[in-house]
Amino acid sequence: MAYPLTGVPDTGDTAWMLASSALVLLMTPGLAFFYGGMVRSKNVLNMIMMSISAMGIVGVIWALFGYSEAFGDNKFGVIGDPGQFFGLKGLIGGNGAKDPATNIPLAGTIPMTVFVAFQLMFAIITVALISGAVADRLKFRAWLVFATIWAIVVYFPVAHWVFDFSVTDPTTKEVVHEGGWIANKLQAIDFAGGTAVHINAGAAGLALALVLGRRKGWPKVPARPHNIPFVMLGAGLLWFGWFGFNAGSAVSSNGLAGSTFLTTTFATCSAMLGWLLVEKIRDGKPTTLGAASGIVAGLVAITPSCSSVNVLGALVIGVVAGILCALAVGLKFKLGFDDSLDVVGVHLVGGLVGTLMVGLFLAPEAGAAAAGAKGLFYGGGFSQLGKQAVGAFSVMAFSFIASLIIAFIIKFTIGLRATEEEEFNGLDDSEHAETAYDFAAVGGTARTAVKEAVKEEA
C-alpha cells in the first residue's frame, strides 16, 4: 500500500486538531506581544514584525516543499524527500457532502491536510522565537533572509528527525514510510518540541546574537521593557495557545490529550512560583515580568515531557525550570553575550531541562511509557536519560553550528546589523518608517499642543 494511508477520518479527532492548529497559530501573535512589550518603545513594531513576518515566510515555504522536507520519506538518513509532497500534491482533498465515505489521505485518524496545518504552526513559532535574541539591532531584510534559510536548512530537517515517525501498513505489517532518526532509531521522547522547537531556536538565537554583537551601551545602559502589560498579555496568549501545542500533539481527542493538558497546566503554575521565589530571594521583590517569564519557562520545560510524566513529575519539572531559567538569564552578563530577551536563558535552558528530566521522571502510567520505558526515579536506570541527552545535544550542536554559518554568510553579503544611527533612533523608524505611539498633536509637538490649549482657555 502506498503512503500516506487512506481512509475515513474520525470527526471528533479532526475537530480537536483543527482547533489545536488555530490555538498554536495564536501563539505567534502572543509571542509578538510578549517580545514587543519587553523592548524599548522605539523598537516595538520591529519586534512585532519579526514574529509576524515568520508567518508569511514559513507558510509559503511549507506549502511548496517544507512539509515534504520535514515529513517526506527519509533520504540520506537526515531529511525528508522535498519532492514527495511538493506543493502538497496528493494531499489536498476532502470528504464531499455527496459521498462522505470517500477515502482521503490520513495521518492517524485525521486528514493529512489537518496534520499539515498543525505542523505548520510549529514551524512558524520556532522561527519567530529566535528573534528575541537579536532585538534592537538586526536589519529587517537580514532577518527575512536568515529566517528563510534557517527554516530550510535547520528547522525542517530537525523536525524530520524528531516529529516524523515511521508508518507501518496495518494489513501487511510492512514499513511504508521511514521517519527521522531521533524519533525512530534513538527513541528519545520529545512529545511536542523541546528539542525541535525550543533547544533548536535557543541555540540559533545564541549563534545569531554572537555574530551580531552587543547592543550599543549594553550592559551599562539599561534597556527596560516599555510595556509590561503587553508582556503579560503575550504570556497569557502563549499559555492559552500552548494547550493546542501540547495536548494537540496527541493528534487525537483522547485520554492522552487530557493528561497532557493537565501536566502542562501544573508545570506552568509551579514554574511561575519558582521564578518568583528566585526574584524574592535574589532581588527582594517578585515582579510582573518575572511572573510572565516563569510562565513561559514552565511551558517550555513541560513541552517535551508532558506525555511522559505524572502530576508530581510535572510539578517538579516546572519548579526546577522556573528556578534554573531565572538563574540562567543572568549568565549573559557574566559571559558577555547580548541575548536581548533571554531566548537562551528561557528556551535553550528550559528545553534542556524538560528534555533531560524525561529520563528521570518517565512514569510507567504515562502515555509515552506504553513500551515499558521508565525514568531513573522509577527504576528504569540511565537508558532513557542517555537517549534524551543524545537527542538534545545533537540538535543543539547542529542548530548552533548551522546558524553560525548562515549568520556569517549574511553578515559578509547583505549585512546583518543596523547602523549606529539607526540603532539610536530606533528600528521602527529606520526599518519600517512607523512609530508605535504618536504623542504629538496634528501640526505640532505635544508641548505646542499644550500651549495652544492654554491660550484658548485664556
Image (cartoon, helix red, strand yellow):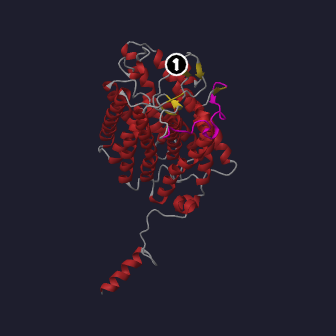
Residue extending farthest to the bottom is 458
User: Can you say which quadrant of the picture contains the C terminus?
Assistant: bottom left
User: Per the image, is 265 magenta?
Assistant: no
User: Can you say which quadrant of the picture contains the N terminus?
Assistant: top right
Image quadrant in which you'd find residue 394: top right
Q: Position of residue 359 (x, y in %)?
A: 43, 20
For the point 34% across and 30% down, the residue is 258
Q: Amino acid at mark 1?
A: Pro
What is the crowding at mark 1: few (fewer than 14 residues within 10 Å), some, or many (at least 20)?
A: few
- In the displayed structure, 163 sits above or below 284; it is above
* 244 and 269: which is toward the camera: 244
Q: Is residue 400 visible?
A: no
Q: Which residues are magenta?
A: 76-96
Residue extending farthest to the right is 413
For the point 38% across and 45% down, the residue is 235
Element assignment for label 1:
loop
Q: Read off the residue under disc 1.
A: 170
* 440 and 113: which is toward the camera: 113
Q: Is residue 358 visible?
A: yes
* 220 and 317: which is toward the camera: 317
Q: Position of residue 383 (x, y in %)?
A: 47, 15
Left or right of 302? Residue 140 is right
Q: Position of residue 84 (x, y in %)?
A: 65, 33
Q: Position of residue 357 (x, y in %)?
A: 42, 24
User: Per the image, is 83 magenta?
Assistant: yes
Q: For the stretch drawn in magenta, what is the main secondary structure?
A: loop
* 348 and 20: which is toward the camera: 20
Q: How many marks?
A: 1
Image quadrant in which you'd find residue 159: top right
Left or right of 120? Residue 413 is right
